[in-house]
Protein backbone atom coordinates (compact mmCIF):
# COMPACT_ATOMS: atom_id res chain seq x y z
CA UNK A 1 0.00 0.00 0.00
CA UNK A 2 1.14 3.52 -0.66
CA UNK A 3 -0.14 7.05 -0.33
CA UNK A 4 -0.12 8.75 -3.73
CA UNK A 5 0.46 12.49 -4.28
CA UNK A 6 -2.70 14.30 -5.43
CA UNK A 7 -2.50 16.80 -8.32
CA UNK A 8 -3.78 20.25 -7.38
CA UNK A 9 -5.90 22.46 -9.63
CA UNK A 10 -4.89 24.21 -11.95
CA UNK A 11 -2.33 21.50 -12.78
CA UNK A 12 -2.76 20.96 -16.56
CA UNK A 13 -2.43 17.18 -16.09
CA UNK A 14 -5.93 17.28 -14.55
CA UNK A 15 -7.18 17.97 -18.10
CA UNK A 16 -5.91 14.65 -19.47
CA UNK A 17 -8.57 12.31 -20.85
CA UNK A 18 -8.02 8.86 -19.28
CA UNK A 19 -7.92 5.76 -21.49
CA UNK A 20 -9.98 2.62 -20.78
CA UNK A 21 -8.33 -0.16 -18.76
CA UNK A 22 -7.64 -3.10 -21.11
CA UNK A 23 -6.88 -5.83 -18.57
CA UNK A 24 -7.92 -5.80 -14.92
CA UNK A 25 -4.81 -7.32 -13.40
CA UNK A 26 -2.73 -7.01 -10.22
CA UNK A 27 -1.34 -3.67 -11.41
CA UNK A 28 -4.89 -2.24 -11.49
CA UNK A 29 -5.77 -3.89 -8.15
CA UNK A 30 -2.66 -2.31 -6.60
CA UNK A 31 -3.67 1.07 -8.05
CA UNK A 32 -7.15 0.66 -6.50
CA UNK A 33 -5.63 -0.24 -3.09
CA UNK A 34 -3.30 2.79 -3.21
CA UNK A 35 -6.08 5.13 -4.36
CA UNK A 36 -8.37 3.88 -1.56
CA UNK A 37 -5.63 4.44 1.04
CA UNK A 38 -5.01 7.94 -0.36
CA UNK A 39 -8.75 8.78 -0.36
CA UNK A 40 -9.32 7.54 3.23
CA UNK A 41 -6.24 9.33 4.52
CA UNK A 42 -7.25 12.69 2.97
CA UNK A 43 -10.09 12.12 4.00
CA UNK A 44 -12.34 12.13 0.96
CA UNK A 45 -15.35 10.29 -0.45
CA UNK A 46 -14.16 9.88 -4.03
CA UNK A 47 -10.93 9.85 -6.02
CA UNK A 48 -10.23 9.39 -9.74
CA UNK A 49 -6.95 7.97 -11.09
CA UNK A 50 -6.47 11.26 -13.00
CA UNK A 51 -5.99 13.01 -9.64
CA UNK A 52 -2.99 10.79 -8.83
CA UNK A 53 -1.56 11.32 -12.33
CA UNK A 54 -2.57 7.89 -13.68
CA UNK A 55 -4.56 8.42 -16.85
CA UNK A 56 -6.59 5.21 -16.92
CA UNK A 57 -10.32 4.90 -16.21
CA UNK A 58 -10.39 3.91 -12.53
CA UNK A 59 -12.26 5.54 -9.64
CA UNK A 60 -12.76 4.74 -5.96
CA UNK A 61 -15.72 5.96 -3.92
CA UNK A 62 -16.92 5.48 -0.36
CA UNK A 63 -19.89 7.62 0.68
CA UNK A 64 -20.69 5.55 3.80
CA UNK A 65 -20.60 7.16 7.26
CA UNK A 66 -18.10 4.65 8.64
CA UNK A 67 -15.87 4.23 5.55
CA UNK A 68 -16.97 0.61 5.19
CA UNK A 69 -18.35 0.61 1.63
CA UNK A 70 -15.46 0.99 -0.78
CA UNK A 71 -16.51 0.90 -4.42
CA UNK A 72 -13.94 0.52 -7.17
CA UNK A 73 -15.22 1.33 -10.66
CA UNK A 74 -13.18 0.48 -13.74
CA UNK A 75 -14.21 1.92 -17.14
CA UNK A 76 -17.39 3.38 -15.58
CA UNK A 77 -20.15 4.59 -17.91
CA UNK A 78 -23.38 6.42 -17.19
CA UNK A 79 -25.96 4.51 -19.22
CA UNK A 80 -29.07 6.38 -18.02
CA UNK A 81 -29.66 9.64 -16.24
CA UNK A 82 -32.59 11.78 -15.29
CA UNK A 83 -33.69 14.66 -13.13
CA UNK A 84 -31.61 17.47 -11.66
CA UNK A 85 -30.08 18.12 -8.27
CA UNK A 86 -27.81 20.85 -6.98
CA UNK A 87 -25.16 19.85 -4.48
CA UNK A 88 -22.33 21.70 -2.77
CA UNK A 89 -19.22 19.91 -4.08
CA UNK A 90 -15.60 19.88 -3.04
CA UNK A 91 -12.57 18.09 -4.48
CA UNK A 92 -9.28 16.80 -3.11
CA UNK A 93 -7.60 18.53 -6.09
CA UNK A 94 -9.20 21.89 -5.16
CA UNK A 95 -8.74 21.97 -1.36
CA UNK A 96 -10.79 24.44 0.65
CA UNK A 97 -13.16 25.31 -2.21
CA UNK A 98 -16.84 24.29 -2.05
CA UNK A 99 -19.35 25.37 -4.70
CA UNK A 100 -22.82 24.31 -5.87
CA UNK A 101 -23.04 22.30 -9.07
CA UNK A 102 -26.22 21.06 -10.80
CA UNK A 103 -26.09 17.52 -12.15
CA UNK A 104 -28.43 14.60 -12.91
CA UNK A 105 -30.41 13.42 -9.89
CA UNK A 106 -30.49 9.77 -10.80
CA UNK A 107 -27.94 7.73 -12.79
CA UNK A 108 -27.55 4.13 -13.86
CA UNK A 109 -23.88 3.12 -14.06
CA UNK A 110 -22.11 0.23 -15.74
CA UNK A 111 -18.51 -0.61 -14.78
CA UNK A 112 -16.05 -3.44 -14.22
CA UNK A 113 -15.21 -4.52 -10.68
CA UNK A 114 -11.70 -5.31 -9.35
CA UNK A 115 -12.00 -8.82 -10.83
CA UNK A 116 -12.85 -7.49 -14.28
CA UNK A 117 -16.52 -8.52 -13.98
CA UNK A 118 -19.11 -6.12 -15.40
CA UNK A 119 -21.79 -4.88 -13.01
CA UNK A 120 -24.49 -2.21 -12.97
CA UNK A 121 -26.09 -0.12 -10.24
CA UNK A 122 -28.40 2.82 -9.77
CA UNK A 123 -27.46 5.83 -7.71
CA UNK A 124 -29.16 8.94 -6.42
CA UNK A 125 -28.24 11.62 -3.92
CA UNK A 126 -24.61 11.86 -2.80
CA UNK A 127 -23.48 8.66 -4.55
CA UNK A 128 -24.92 9.90 -7.85
CA UNK A 129 -23.13 13.26 -7.48
CA UNK A 130 -19.89 11.50 -6.58
CA UNK A 131 -19.96 9.11 -9.56
CA UNK A 132 -20.63 12.01 -11.97
CA UNK A 133 -17.89 14.15 -10.37
CA UNK A 134 -15.33 11.33 -10.60
CA UNK A 135 -16.21 10.34 -14.20
CA UNK A 136 -15.73 14.03 -15.10
CA UNK A 137 -12.14 13.75 -13.77
CA UNK A 138 -11.52 10.81 -16.13
CA UNK A 139 -12.69 13.08 -18.96
CA UNK A 140 -10.31 15.84 -17.83
CA UNK A 141 -12.97 18.01 -16.22
CA UNK A 142 -12.76 19.56 -12.73
CA UNK A 143 -16.00 20.65 -10.98
CA UNK A 144 -14.99 24.33 -10.75
CA UNK A 145 -15.12 24.45 -14.56
CA UNK A 146 -18.93 24.39 -14.33
CA UNK A 147 -18.83 27.77 -12.56
CA UNK A 148 -18.91 31.22 -14.15
CA UNK A 149 -15.60 32.70 -15.31
CA UNK A 150 -15.91 35.28 -12.56
CA UNK A 151 -16.13 32.61 -9.85
CA UNK A 152 -13.44 30.48 -11.51
CA UNK A 153 -11.01 33.42 -11.64
CA UNK A 154 -11.66 34.21 -7.97
CA UNK A 155 -10.95 30.57 -7.10
CA UNK A 156 -7.74 30.59 -9.16
CA UNK A 157 -6.47 33.72 -7.33
CA UNK A 158 -7.36 32.21 -3.98
CA UNK A 159 -5.51 28.97 -4.77
CA UNK A 160 -2.49 30.87 -6.15
CA UNK A 161 -2.33 32.96 -2.98
CA UNK A 162 -2.56 29.84 -0.81
CA UNK A 163 0.15 28.08 -2.88
CA UNK A 164 2.49 31.04 -2.25
CA UNK A 165 2.00 30.69 1.50
CA UNK A 166 2.33 26.89 1.65
CA UNK A 167 5.27 26.72 -0.81
C1 LIG B 1 -16.11 14.52 -4.77
O1 LIG B 1 -14.70 15.04 -2.97
C2 LIG B 1 -17.47 14.92 -4.26
O2 LIG B 1 -11.63 20.82 -0.07
C3 LIG B 1 -15.21 13.94 -3.70
O3 LIG B 1 -10.02 20.54 2.05
C4 LIG B 1 -17.65 16.06 -3.46
O4 LIG B 1 -13.77 13.74 -1.41
C5 LIG B 1 -18.55 14.20 -4.58
C6 LIG B 1 -11.99 17.22 0.46
C7 LIG B 1 -18.92 16.40 -3.00
C8 LIG B 1 -19.80 14.52 -4.12
C9 LIG B 1 -20.00 15.62 -3.33
C10 LIG B 1 -12.13 18.49 -0.09
C11 LIG B 1 -11.17 17.08 1.56
C12 LIG B 1 -12.65 16.06 -0.10
C13 LIG B 1 -11.47 19.58 0.46
C14 LIG B 1 -13.96 14.85 -1.85
C15 LIG B 1 -10.64 19.42 1.56
C16 LIG B 1 -10.50 18.17 2.12
C17 LIG B 1 -13.39 16.07 -1.24
CO1 LIG C 1 -12.63 15.78 -7.51
Image (tube, helix red, strand yellow):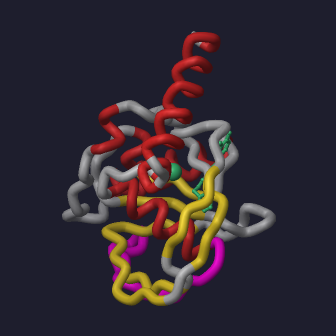
Measured as percent of width and height from the top left, residue 119 is found at: 41, 85
Q: Which residues are magenta?
A: 111-126
Horizontally, residue 87 falls left or right of residue 58, namely right
Horizontally, residue 89 falls left or right of residue 142, namely right
Horizontally, residue 117 falls left or right of residue 7, namely left
Measured as percent of width and height from the top left, residue 99 is found at: 62, 52
Q: Nearer the viewer, residue 5 or 12?
A: 12
| Residue 1 seen in this snapshot | no
Q: Nearer the viewer, residue 9 or 35?
A: 9
Q: Is residue 104 above or below residue 164?
A: below
Give the quarter of the figure containing the N terminus: top right
Find out whether residue 125 is within the magenta segment.
Answer: yes
Q: Nearer the viewer, residue 148 or 32?
A: 148
Q: Nearer the viewer, residue 153 or 84?
A: 153
Residue lying at the far right of the rendered structure = 66
Q: Residue at x 36, y 52 (%)?
A: 141
Res 125 → quadrant: bottom right
Q: Residue at x 41, y 57 (%)?
A: 29
Q: Is residue 26 above or below residue 13?
A: below
Q: Residue at x 49, y 35 (%)?
A: 6
Give the quarter of the figure containing the C terminus: top right
Q: Is residue 110 above or below residue 34?
A: below
| Residue 139 seen in this snapshot | yes
Measured as percent of width and height from the top left, residue 87 is found at: 64, 66
Find out whether residue 132 is within the magenta segment.
Answer: no
Q: Is residue 47 above or below residue 118?
A: above
Res 74 → quadrant: bottom left
Amino acid sequence: MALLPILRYPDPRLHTRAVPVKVVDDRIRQLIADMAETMYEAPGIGLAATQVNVHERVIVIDVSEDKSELMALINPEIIEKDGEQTYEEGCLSVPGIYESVTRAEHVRVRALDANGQPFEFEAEGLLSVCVQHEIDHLDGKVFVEYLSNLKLNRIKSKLAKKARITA
